[in-house]
Image (spheres, rainbow, N blue to C red):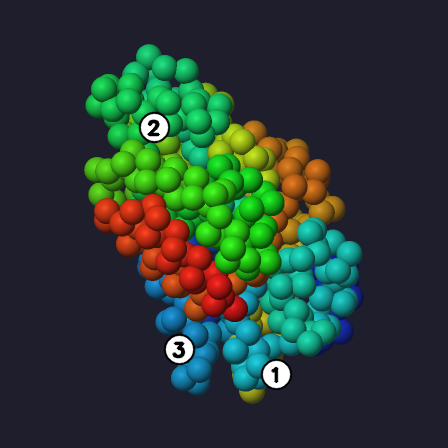
Amino acid sequence: MSNVLKSLLVGTALTCASTAQAVELEVTHWWTSGGEAAAVSKFADAWNATGNTWLDGAIAGSGGTARPIIISRILGGDPMAATQLNHGRQAEELIEAGLLLDLTDVADAGGWRDIVNPTALLDSCTLDGKIYCVPVNIHSAQWIWLSHAAYENAGLDVPTDWHEFVASADELQAAGTLPLAMGQQGWQQSIAFGAITIAVAGLDAWKGVNVSKDASVARGPEYTAVFEAVVAARELARGSNVQDWNLATNMVITGQAGAQIMGDWAQGEFAVAEQVEGVDYSCLPGLGLNAVLDTGGDAFYFPVNDDPEITAAQKELAALLISPEVQVSFNLAKGSLPVRGDIDMSSANGCMQKGLGILADGGVLPSSDITFSADTQTQIEDLMAQFWSGDMSAANAQASYADLIESAD
Protein backbone atom coordinates (compact mmCIF):
# COMPACT_ATOMS: atom_id res chain seq x y z
CA MET A 1 0.00 0.00 0.00
CA SER A 2 1.36 3.43 -0.93
CA ASN A 3 2.44 6.09 1.56
CA VAL A 4 -0.23 8.39 0.11
CA LEU A 5 -3.00 5.98 1.00
CA LYS A 6 -1.49 5.23 4.44
CA SER A 7 -1.48 8.94 5.22
CA LEU A 8 -5.05 9.20 4.01
CA LEU A 9 -6.21 6.36 6.23
CA VAL A 10 -4.39 7.73 9.27
CA GLY A 11 -5.80 11.19 8.65
CA THR A 12 -9.35 9.97 8.40
CA ALA A 13 -8.94 7.29 11.10
CA LEU A 14 -10.91 4.79 9.10
CA THR A 15 -12.31 2.02 11.23
CA CYS A 16 -12.62 -0.37 8.33
CA ALA A 17 -9.74 -2.67 7.49
CA SER A 18 -7.57 -1.64 4.56
CA THR A 19 -7.32 -3.97 1.64
CA ALA A 20 -4.73 -6.70 2.06
CA GLN A 21 -3.85 -6.79 -1.60
CA ALA A 22 -4.46 -4.85 -4.79
CA VAL A 23 -8.11 -4.69 -5.75
CA GLU A 24 -9.72 -3.86 -9.08
CA LEU A 25 -12.88 -1.75 -8.81
CA GLU A 26 -15.17 -1.11 -11.74
CA VAL A 27 -16.40 2.50 -11.63
CA THR A 28 -19.25 3.65 -13.86
CA HIS A 29 -19.86 7.27 -14.85
CA TRP A 30 -21.02 9.39 -17.79
CA TRP A 31 -18.02 11.70 -18.04
CA THR A 32 -16.98 11.21 -21.66
CA SER A 33 -16.37 14.68 -23.14
CA GLY A 34 -12.79 15.91 -23.44
CA GLY A 35 -12.92 18.01 -20.29
CA GLU A 36 -14.80 15.37 -18.32
CA ALA A 37 -12.38 12.61 -19.33
CA ALA A 38 -9.46 14.78 -18.21
CA ALA A 39 -11.16 15.28 -14.86
CA VAL A 40 -12.15 11.68 -14.14
CA SER A 41 -8.59 10.61 -14.93
CA LYS A 42 -7.54 12.48 -11.78
CA PHE A 43 -9.66 10.07 -9.74
CA ALA A 44 -8.37 7.06 -11.65
CA ASP A 45 -4.73 8.12 -11.30
CA ALA A 46 -5.10 8.67 -7.56
CA TRP A 47 -6.66 5.24 -7.07
CA ASN A 48 -4.14 3.48 -9.28
CA ALA A 49 -1.34 5.17 -7.33
CA THR A 50 -2.42 3.21 -4.26
CA GLY A 51 -1.55 -0.04 -6.04
CA ASN A 52 -5.19 -0.81 -6.77
CA THR A 53 -6.84 -0.63 -10.20
CA TRP A 54 -9.57 1.66 -11.48
CA LEU A 55 -11.55 -0.21 -14.16
CA ASP A 56 -13.21 2.59 -16.07
CA GLY A 57 -16.85 1.99 -16.96
CA ALA A 58 -17.64 5.15 -18.90
CA ILE A 59 -21.13 5.22 -20.41
CA ALA A 60 -21.46 7.45 -23.45
CA GLY A 61 -24.22 10.03 -23.36
CA SER A 62 -25.74 12.18 -20.68
CA GLY A 63 -26.82 11.23 -17.19
CA GLY A 64 -30.29 10.59 -18.56
CA THR A 65 -28.80 7.87 -20.76
CA ALA A 66 -26.47 6.43 -18.15
CA ARG A 67 -28.66 6.37 -15.05
CA PRO A 68 -31.14 3.74 -16.31
CA ILE A 69 -28.22 1.50 -17.29
CA ILE A 70 -26.55 1.94 -13.91
CA ILE A 71 -29.74 1.33 -11.97
CA SER A 72 -30.67 -1.67 -14.12
CA ARG A 73 -27.33 -3.32 -13.43
CA ILE A 74 -27.68 -2.84 -9.68
CA LEU A 75 -31.25 -4.10 -9.61
CA GLY A 76 -30.33 -6.98 -11.90
CA GLY A 77 -27.63 -8.34 -9.60
CA ASP A 78 -24.67 -7.21 -11.73
CA PRO A 79 -23.47 -4.20 -9.75
CA MET A 80 -20.33 -2.21 -10.37
CA ALA A 81 -18.12 -1.42 -7.39
CA ALA A 82 -18.82 2.32 -7.52
CA THR A 83 -20.94 4.60 -9.62
CA GLN A 84 -21.49 8.27 -10.27
CA LEU A 85 -24.96 9.65 -9.67
CA ASN A 86 -26.10 13.13 -8.71
CA HIS A 87 -26.44 13.62 -5.00
CA GLY A 88 -30.09 14.07 -4.27
CA ARG A 89 -33.08 11.80 -4.72
CA GLN A 90 -31.93 9.63 -7.62
CA ALA A 91 -30.82 6.76 -5.39
CA GLU A 92 -33.68 6.76 -2.86
CA GLU A 93 -35.26 3.52 -4.05
CA LEU A 94 -31.90 1.71 -4.26
CA ILE A 95 -31.11 2.73 -0.68
CA GLU A 96 -34.54 1.67 0.55
CA ALA A 97 -34.01 -1.71 -1.13
CA GLY A 98 -30.74 -2.18 0.80
CA LEU A 99 -28.63 -2.23 -2.37
CA LEU A 100 -26.18 0.59 -1.55
CA LEU A 101 -23.34 0.55 0.96
CA ASP A 102 -23.68 2.53 4.19
CA LEU A 103 -20.70 4.91 4.36
CA THR A 104 -21.50 6.42 7.75
CA ASP A 105 -18.39 4.99 9.41
CA VAL A 106 -16.16 6.44 6.67
CA ALA A 107 -17.91 9.81 6.90
CA ASP A 108 -17.63 9.92 10.70
CA ALA A 109 -13.97 8.94 10.63
CA GLY A 110 -13.21 11.58 8.01
CA GLY A 111 -15.21 14.32 9.67
CA TRP A 112 -17.30 14.88 6.56
CA ARG A 113 -19.93 16.85 8.46
CA ASP A 114 -17.27 19.38 9.43
CA ILE A 115 -15.66 19.77 6.00
CA VAL A 116 -18.47 19.44 3.43
CA ASN A 117 -19.71 22.90 2.46
CA PRO A 118 -22.59 23.51 2.12
CA THR A 119 -23.84 20.86 4.52
CA ALA A 120 -26.90 20.33 2.30
CA LEU A 121 -24.68 18.27 0.00
CA LEU A 122 -24.10 15.69 2.71
CA ASP A 123 -27.72 15.90 3.79
CA SER A 124 -28.68 14.87 0.26
CA CYS A 125 -26.53 11.74 0.68
CA THR A 126 -28.29 10.91 3.94
CA LEU A 127 -31.38 8.79 4.50
CA ASP A 128 -32.69 7.85 7.94
CA GLY A 129 -29.54 9.21 9.53
CA LYS A 130 -27.13 7.13 7.44
CA ILE A 131 -24.78 8.40 4.73
CA TYR A 132 -24.81 6.50 1.44
CA CYS A 133 -22.68 8.59 -0.92
CA VAL A 134 -19.59 10.75 -1.06
CA PRO A 135 -20.17 14.12 -2.74
CA VAL A 136 -17.22 15.05 -4.95
CA ASN A 137 -18.10 18.43 -6.43
CA ILE A 138 -20.51 21.33 -6.60
CA HIS A 139 -21.94 22.04 -10.00
CA SER A 140 -24.15 24.99 -10.77
CA ALA A 141 -26.21 25.46 -13.90
CA GLN A 142 -26.94 29.19 -14.00
CA TRP A 143 -24.11 30.34 -16.29
CA ILE A 144 -23.85 31.91 -19.71
CA TRP A 145 -20.59 31.45 -21.61
CA LEU A 146 -19.66 34.10 -24.18
CA SER A 147 -17.26 33.89 -27.10
CA HIS A 148 -14.91 36.86 -27.41
CA ALA A 149 -14.08 35.91 -30.99
CA ALA A 150 -17.73 36.02 -32.01
CA TYR A 151 -18.22 39.48 -30.54
CA GLU A 152 -14.96 40.81 -31.93
CA ASN A 153 -15.99 39.57 -35.37
CA ALA A 154 -19.29 41.44 -35.06
CA GLY A 155 -17.57 44.58 -33.77
CA LEU A 156 -19.41 44.39 -30.45
CA ASP A 157 -18.49 44.57 -26.81
CA VAL A 158 -18.94 41.32 -24.90
CA PRO A 159 -22.25 41.51 -22.99
CA THR A 160 -22.25 41.74 -19.23
CA ASP A 161 -25.73 40.35 -18.62
CA TRP A 162 -28.64 38.51 -20.26
CA HIS A 163 -30.39 41.68 -21.42
CA GLU A 164 -27.27 42.92 -23.21
CA PHE A 165 -26.88 39.52 -24.81
CA VAL A 166 -30.43 39.55 -26.18
CA ALA A 167 -29.89 43.10 -27.45
CA SER A 168 -26.75 41.98 -29.32
CA ALA A 169 -28.45 39.10 -31.14
CA ASP A 170 -29.45 40.94 -34.32
CA GLU A 171 -25.92 42.23 -34.94
CA LEU A 172 -24.45 38.79 -34.24
CA GLN A 173 -26.78 37.28 -36.81
CA ALA A 174 -25.91 40.01 -39.30
CA ALA A 175 -22.27 39.01 -38.88
CA GLY A 176 -23.16 35.39 -39.69
CA THR A 177 -22.96 34.15 -36.10
CA LEU A 178 -25.58 32.07 -34.32
CA PRO A 179 -26.48 33.95 -31.13
CA LEU A 180 -27.22 31.01 -28.85
CA ALA A 181 -25.79 27.48 -29.05
CA MET A 182 -28.18 24.86 -27.67
CA GLY A 183 -27.94 21.09 -27.66
CA GLN A 184 -31.19 19.44 -28.67
CA GLN A 185 -31.78 17.48 -25.46
CA GLY A 186 -34.39 18.11 -22.80
CA TRP A 187 -31.99 18.30 -19.89
CA GLN A 188 -29.98 21.04 -21.60
CA GLN A 189 -33.11 23.00 -22.45
CA SER A 190 -34.33 22.54 -18.88
CA ILE A 191 -31.06 24.01 -17.60
CA ALA A 192 -31.51 27.03 -19.87
CA PHE A 193 -35.09 27.44 -18.66
CA GLY A 194 -33.96 27.36 -15.04
CA ALA A 195 -31.21 29.90 -15.62
CA ILE A 196 -33.55 32.26 -17.45
CA THR A 197 -36.07 31.84 -14.62
CA ILE A 198 -33.60 33.06 -12.02
CA ALA A 199 -32.54 35.95 -14.25
CA VAL A 200 -36.03 37.05 -15.28
CA ALA A 201 -38.41 36.01 -12.49
CA GLY A 202 -36.00 36.42 -9.59
CA LEU A 203 -35.14 34.31 -6.59
CA ASP A 204 -38.41 34.55 -4.67
CA ALA A 205 -40.47 33.26 -7.59
CA TRP A 206 -37.89 30.54 -8.31
CA LYS A 207 -38.01 29.35 -4.70
CA GLY A 208 -41.78 29.48 -4.67
CA VAL A 209 -41.90 26.96 -7.49
CA ASN A 210 -38.77 24.86 -7.02
CA VAL A 211 -38.72 24.68 -3.23
CA SER A 212 -42.32 25.25 -2.13
CA LYS A 213 -43.81 23.67 -5.29
CA ASP A 214 -46.43 26.43 -5.41
CA ALA A 215 -48.31 26.01 -8.68
CA SER A 216 -49.95 29.42 -8.26
CA VAL A 217 -46.53 31.04 -8.61
CA ALA A 218 -45.86 28.92 -11.69
CA ARG A 219 -49.10 30.27 -13.17
CA GLY A 220 -48.32 33.84 -12.13
CA PRO A 221 -46.94 36.88 -13.97
CA GLU A 222 -43.31 36.29 -13.02
CA TYR A 223 -43.35 32.94 -14.79
CA THR A 224 -45.32 34.36 -17.70
CA ALA A 225 -42.35 36.64 -18.29
CA VAL A 226 -40.02 33.63 -18.13
CA PHE A 227 -41.91 31.64 -20.76
CA GLU A 228 -42.06 34.67 -23.04
CA ALA A 229 -38.29 35.11 -22.59
CA VAL A 230 -37.75 31.47 -23.53
CA VAL A 231 -39.80 31.94 -26.71
CA ALA A 232 -37.40 34.73 -27.65
CA ALA A 233 -34.37 32.63 -26.65
CA ARG A 234 -35.41 29.63 -28.72
CA GLU A 235 -35.48 31.86 -31.79
CA LEU A 236 -31.89 32.87 -31.04
CA ALA A 237 -30.97 29.17 -30.97
CA ARG A 238 -32.65 28.26 -34.27
CA GLY A 239 -29.99 26.59 -36.38
CA SER A 240 -28.18 25.05 -33.43
CA ASN A 241 -28.52 21.49 -34.64
CA VAL A 242 -26.02 19.74 -32.36
CA GLN A 243 -27.18 17.20 -29.81
CA ASP A 244 -24.53 16.99 -27.12
CA TRP A 245 -23.79 19.85 -24.75
CA ASN A 246 -20.04 19.79 -25.39
CA LEU A 247 -20.64 20.22 -29.12
CA ALA A 248 -22.64 23.33 -28.32
CA THR A 249 -19.78 24.52 -26.10
CA ASN A 250 -17.42 23.97 -29.02
CA MET A 251 -19.52 26.34 -31.10
CA VAL A 252 -18.73 29.04 -28.53
CA ILE A 253 -15.06 28.05 -28.37
CA THR A 254 -14.72 28.30 -32.15
CA GLY A 255 -16.72 31.51 -32.45
CA GLN A 256 -19.57 29.92 -34.40
CA ALA A 257 -21.99 30.97 -31.65
CA GLY A 258 -22.04 33.99 -29.41
CA ALA A 259 -23.07 32.21 -26.23
CA GLN A 260 -24.29 29.08 -24.50
CA ILE A 261 -26.30 28.65 -21.31
CA MET A 262 -24.71 25.69 -19.58
CA GLY A 263 -23.43 24.55 -16.21
CA ASP A 264 -19.97 25.28 -14.92
CA TRP A 265 -18.70 21.95 -16.27
CA ALA A 266 -18.34 23.78 -19.59
CA GLN A 267 -15.09 25.15 -18.15
CA GLY A 268 -13.46 21.78 -18.69
CA GLU A 269 -14.00 22.11 -22.44
CA PHE A 270 -12.51 25.60 -22.53
CA ALA A 271 -9.52 24.29 -20.57
CA VAL A 272 -8.92 21.40 -23.00
CA ALA A 273 -9.10 23.92 -25.87
CA GLU A 274 -6.47 26.01 -24.02
CA GLN A 275 -8.74 29.02 -23.91
CA VAL A 276 -8.23 31.65 -21.23
CA GLU A 277 -11.04 33.17 -19.17
CA GLY A 278 -11.26 36.91 -19.72
CA VAL A 279 -9.28 36.68 -22.96
CA ASP A 280 -11.05 34.08 -25.09
CA TYR A 281 -14.33 33.75 -23.24
CA SER A 282 -16.36 35.26 -20.42
CA CYS A 283 -18.65 33.62 -17.90
CA LEU A 284 -21.63 35.17 -16.15
CA PRO A 285 -23.17 33.36 -13.17
CA GLY A 286 -26.89 33.96 -12.88
CA LEU A 287 -26.72 35.27 -16.46
CA GLY A 288 -25.13 38.39 -14.99
CA LEU A 289 -28.35 39.39 -13.20
CA ASN A 290 -28.68 37.23 -10.11
CA ALA A 291 -25.32 35.81 -9.09
CA VAL A 292 -26.35 32.62 -7.35
CA LEU A 293 -25.41 28.96 -7.54
CA ASP A 294 -27.59 25.91 -7.26
CA THR A 295 -25.64 23.39 -5.26
CA GLY A 296 -26.05 20.37 -7.47
CA GLY A 297 -23.25 18.11 -8.46
CA ASP A 298 -21.95 14.59 -8.50
CA ALA A 299 -21.51 11.92 -5.90
CA PHE A 300 -20.33 8.32 -5.83
CA TYR A 301 -22.40 5.45 -4.49
CA PHE A 302 -21.12 1.96 -3.76
CA PRO A 303 -23.40 -1.03 -4.37
CA VAL A 304 -23.47 -3.69 -1.66
CA ASN A 305 -21.55 -6.90 -2.37
CA ASP A 306 -20.67 -10.05 -0.43
CA ASP A 307 -16.88 -9.76 -0.63
CA PRO A 308 -15.33 -8.14 2.49
CA GLU A 309 -12.20 -7.27 0.52
CA ILE A 310 -14.23 -5.36 -2.08
CA THR A 311 -16.21 -3.62 0.65
CA ALA A 312 -12.99 -2.47 2.34
CA ALA A 313 -11.67 -1.19 -0.99
CA GLN A 314 -14.93 0.65 -1.68
CA LYS A 315 -14.57 2.49 1.61
CA GLU A 316 -10.95 3.34 0.86
CA LEU A 317 -11.99 4.78 -2.50
CA ALA A 318 -14.78 6.80 -0.87
CA ALA A 319 -12.26 8.38 1.50
CA LEU A 320 -9.80 9.02 -1.31
CA LEU A 321 -12.36 10.85 -3.48
CA ILE A 322 -12.93 13.50 -0.81
CA SER A 323 -9.28 13.83 0.28
CA PRO A 324 -7.81 17.35 -0.07
CA GLU A 325 -5.31 16.64 -2.86
CA VAL A 326 -7.80 14.74 -5.00
CA GLN A 327 -10.50 17.35 -4.47
CA VAL A 328 -8.17 20.06 -5.77
CA SER A 329 -6.87 18.18 -8.82
CA PHE A 330 -10.26 16.84 -9.88
CA ASN A 331 -12.22 20.07 -9.53
CA LEU A 332 -9.58 22.21 -11.23
CA ALA A 333 -9.89 19.91 -14.23
CA LYS A 334 -13.68 19.61 -14.07
CA GLY A 335 -14.44 23.31 -13.62
CA SER A 336 -16.60 22.54 -10.60
CA LEU A 337 -16.20 23.68 -7.02
CA PRO A 338 -14.82 21.36 -4.32
CA VAL A 339 -17.13 20.05 -1.64
CA ARG A 340 -14.48 20.68 1.02
CA GLY A 341 -14.48 24.11 2.58
CA ASP A 342 -10.97 23.75 3.98
CA ILE A 343 -8.72 23.55 0.91
CA ASP A 344 -6.71 26.09 -1.08
CA MET A 345 -8.24 26.89 -4.48
CA SER A 346 -6.18 30.01 -5.18
CA SER A 347 -4.97 28.50 -8.47
CA ALA A 348 -8.54 28.36 -9.84
CA ASN A 349 -9.41 30.54 -12.85
CA GLY A 350 -11.63 33.61 -12.78
CA CYS A 351 -14.88 31.73 -13.38
CA MET A 352 -14.21 29.34 -10.53
CA GLN A 353 -13.24 32.27 -8.31
CA LYS A 354 -16.61 33.85 -9.06
CA GLY A 355 -18.28 30.64 -7.97
CA LEU A 356 -16.18 30.37 -4.83
CA GLY A 357 -17.08 33.96 -3.95
CA ILE A 358 -20.79 33.30 -4.34
CA LEU A 359 -20.45 30.16 -2.24
CA ALA A 360 -18.60 32.08 0.49
CA ASP A 361 -21.32 34.74 0.51
CA GLY A 362 -24.02 32.12 0.96
CA GLY A 363 -25.65 32.73 -2.42
CA VAL A 364 -26.67 29.11 -2.86
CA LEU A 365 -29.87 27.40 -3.89
CA PRO A 366 -30.82 23.72 -3.72
CA SER A 367 -30.54 21.93 -7.04
CA SER A 368 -33.52 20.34 -8.72
CA ASP A 369 -31.92 16.95 -8.06
CA ILE A 370 -32.64 17.62 -4.40
CA THR A 371 -36.03 19.36 -4.62
CA PHE A 372 -37.72 17.21 -7.27
CA SER A 373 -37.97 13.46 -7.73
CA ALA A 374 -36.38 11.88 -10.77
CA ASP A 375 -39.85 11.30 -12.25
CA THR A 376 -40.81 14.96 -11.92
CA GLN A 377 -37.52 16.08 -13.43
CA THR A 378 -38.01 13.77 -16.40
CA GLN A 379 -41.47 15.19 -17.02
CA ILE A 380 -40.13 18.75 -16.90
CA GLU A 381 -37.29 17.88 -19.28
CA ASP A 382 -39.74 16.28 -21.70
CA LEU A 383 -41.87 19.42 -21.64
CA MET A 384 -38.83 21.64 -22.21
CA ALA A 385 -37.69 19.54 -25.17
CA GLN A 386 -41.12 20.00 -26.74
CA PHE A 387 -41.25 23.72 -25.91
CA TRP A 388 -37.76 24.62 -27.15
CA SER A 389 -37.79 22.57 -30.32
CA GLY A 390 -41.29 23.30 -31.57
CA ASP A 391 -43.76 26.14 -31.80
CA MET A 392 -45.61 25.63 -28.53
CA SER A 393 -46.89 28.96 -27.24
CA ALA A 394 -45.61 30.48 -24.02
CA ALA A 395 -49.11 30.30 -22.52
CA ASN A 396 -49.56 26.60 -23.30
CA ALA A 397 -46.10 25.72 -22.03
CA GLN A 398 -46.68 27.66 -18.82
CA ALA A 399 -50.01 25.92 -18.23
CA SER A 400 -48.44 22.48 -18.71
CA TYR A 401 -45.52 23.39 -16.47
CA ALA A 402 -47.79 24.61 -13.69
CA ASP A 403 -49.73 21.35 -13.83
CA LEU A 404 -46.45 19.44 -13.38
CA ILE A 405 -45.51 21.58 -10.39
CA GLU A 406 -48.94 21.02 -8.85
CA SER A 407 -48.44 17.24 -8.95
CA ALA A 408 -44.67 17.29 -8.25
CA ASP A 409 -43.22 15.03 -5.58
Q: Which residue is depicted at the point 40% across and 63% down?
A: 378
Give me the C-alpha separation between circle 1 and circle 2.
53 Å
Q: Quadrant of the N terminus?
A: bottom right
Which is nearer the eye, 182 or 256?
182
- Image quadrant in which you'd find residue 270: top left
Whether residue 121 is visible to the viewer of this picture, yes or no, is: yes
Q: Which residue is mark 3?
A: 72
Q: Which residue is mark 1?
A: 308
Q: What amino acid is at disc 3?
A: Ser
Q: What amino acid is at disc 1?
A: Pro
Mark 3 surroundings: few (<14), some (14-19) or many (≥20) residues within 10 A: few
Mark 1 surroundings: few (<14), some (14-19) or many (≥20) residues within 10 A: few
> Which of pointers 3 and 1 lies earlier in the amino acid sequence?
3
Give me the C-alpha separation between circle 2 and circle 3.
40 Å
Q: What amino acid is at disc 2?
A: Gly
Q: Which residue is depicted at the point 66% across and 35% down?
A: 357
* In this view, the mark in front (2 or 3): 2
Q: Which residue is depicted at the point 43% across and 44% down?
A: 224
Q: Which residue is mark 2?
A: 258
* Tag 1 near tag 2, CB within 8 Å: no
* Residue 235: image location, x then y, percent: 27, 36
> Which of pointers 2 and 3 lies earlier in the amino acid sequence?
3
* Residue 144: image location, x then y, percent: 44, 35
* Residue 304: image location, x then y, percent: 56, 81
> Which of pointers 1 and 2 lies earlier in the amino acid sequence?
2
* Tag 3 near tag 1, CB within 8 Å: no
